[in-house]
Amino acid sequence: MTRWTLIVIAALLGTASGLGAYTFIAAKGYSYLTNDAAACANCHVMREHFSAWEKSSHRKVAVCNDCHAPHDNFVRKYAVKGENGFLHSLNFTTGRHPDPLRIREGNRRVAQEACLSCHGDLAKGITPTGHAGTGPNEIDCIQCHRYVGHWVR
């Protein structure tokens, strides 16, 4: 590589790193590393959901991460949070977020796992295959209980 190629690469990497750091600080990205539910209201699109959660039955027992981040291990939790953070910032910056917001399939699975981690014993036996079974007979908790955590009209 020539000296100029290295300079251009260094300048591009420096610019990308600087813009990323500035955006992370300006958007309060560090707050998403905590369990503070108010962090989810940093973005105006989520304020209505946050307000609804504050009035919900889950407010006293669960924060956003309890339902929207995996519980099984630290790496998976922050991988999901990182992917969601990147996609949220990209979609909100470009104006491509769906209105009303819709849960993606991977996040739906995470929420399903979270429901069962707290309510699994209660859900057993509600249907012949188990309320939240597996395979073709699986019933998704969110199908019937989509408004439990934060109902938005």
Image (cartoon, grey):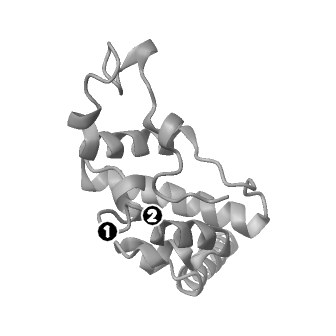
Binning the other alpha carbons within 10 Å of mark 1 as few (below 14), some (14 to 19) or many (20 upward) gives few
Where's residue 61, x and y in %? 29, 63
Where's residue 147, x and y in %? 53, 51
**Residue 13 vertical placement versus 130 (above, below):** below
**Residue 83 vertical placement versus 126 (above, below):** below
Where's residue 62, x and y in %? 33, 62
Which quarter of the picture shows residue 37?
bottom left
Which quarter of the picture shows residue 49?
bottom right
Q: Is residue 144 visible?
A: yes
Count of marks overlaid on the render: 2
Q: Quadrant of the N terminus?
A: bottom right
**Residue 62 vertical placement versus 125 (above, below):** below
Q: Quadrant of the C terminus?
A: bottom right
Give the residue type that dot 1 points to: Lys
Left or right of residue 93, residue 63 in this image: left
Q: Which residue: 32% across, 13% down? A: 128
What residue is pinned by disc 2?
56
Return the residue nearer the eye: 40 or 75: 40
Q: Do tag 2 and tag 1 residues touch (Cβ < 8 Å)?
A: no
Of the numbered discs in the image, which one, if any, rests on residue 128? Answer: none
What residue is pinned by disc 1?
60
Q: Element under label 1?
A: loop
Give the residue type that dot 2 points to: Ser
Q: Which residue: 77% across, 57% down? A: 96
